[in-house]
Amino acid sequence: MHLVNACGRFALALILGTLACTPPGSLAQSTQAAGASCEYIGVRFVPPTGWTVKVESDGEPLSRITLQGSSAGHRILASIFARETLTSAERSPSAQAHTYFQKFQAATVSEPFTDFIETTVEDSGRTYPAFGYRERLPGPNPAMDVQQETIVLLVFPGDFPAGGYFYPIFWTDSHLASASAGSLAELQALAHSFSVKASPVGASAKGCGLP
């Protein structure tokens, strides 16, 4: 998986509202052992080893899964959501993805994000709609400026739109602006491990450490 130009920060506060992100309220937290699976909001996935996994909610039916860790000295923040099929677009993955990305960009128009890109990523025989952007955060001096680069992958179940939901994965890489963006190997592995087991509405939180 390779997406050189897709970059930015995870704009959590701005996804709240127009994209229906649930405000935080930690329900569970786990640090992952090698190869252990997690299952929340009806999806199962394998997070990177040693990363912290939390499921968060604020009394809403759909929770948010937040993953935090590091990769080659870069701080990574990732989140997984369930999003209901958009009524304003045709019920195909490409149309849903384009509308979702356009709504996100419109919601962040006042933010200092740059280098937006909408594309697709091919990996292991699967195609993921993808969106990227970046933000530069000034440090105490130019040598300490931080670059935040975000990639958003959308995972559509094989039976979509039958299940009524698709799943954005936000992946933000924070590093010194003088350094290059990090590897996407962990994002690739996360997406590859992703499987939908049940509707996110009312799904039991089986937690982490699953075989």
Image: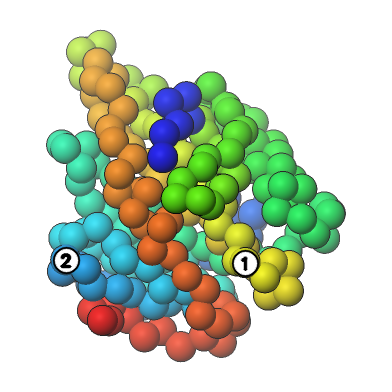
x 47%, y 70%: residue: 195
Among the 4 quarters of the image, the one containing residue 91? bottom right
Q: Which residue is mark 1?
A: 158
- Amino acid of disc 2: Ala
Marker disc for residue 128: none
- Position of 47 relative to 203 (above/below): above
Along the line of sight, the residue nearer the viewer: 40 or 121: 121
x 45%, y 31%: residue: 3
x 52%, y 73%: residue: 196
Residue 53, image x and y in percent? Answer: 29, 66
Q: Residue furthest front?
A: 125
**Disc 1 packing (10 Å; few <14; some 14–19; many ≥20):** few
- Position of 13 relative to 40 (above/below): above
Quarter of the figure with the N terminus: top left
- Position of 72 relative to 201 (above/below): above
Looking at the rendered image, the disc whose residue lies closer to the viewer, 1 or 2, is 1
Say if residue 21 shows up in the picture.
Answer: no
Relative side of 178 to 101, left or right: left
x 24%, y 58%: residue: 48
Reading the chain from its start, which is encountered first: label 1 or label 2?
A: 2
Residue 15, image x and y in percent? Answer: 57, 50
Say if residue 1 shows up in the picture.
Answer: yes
Secondary element at image label 2: loop
Q: Which residue is mark 2?
A: 34
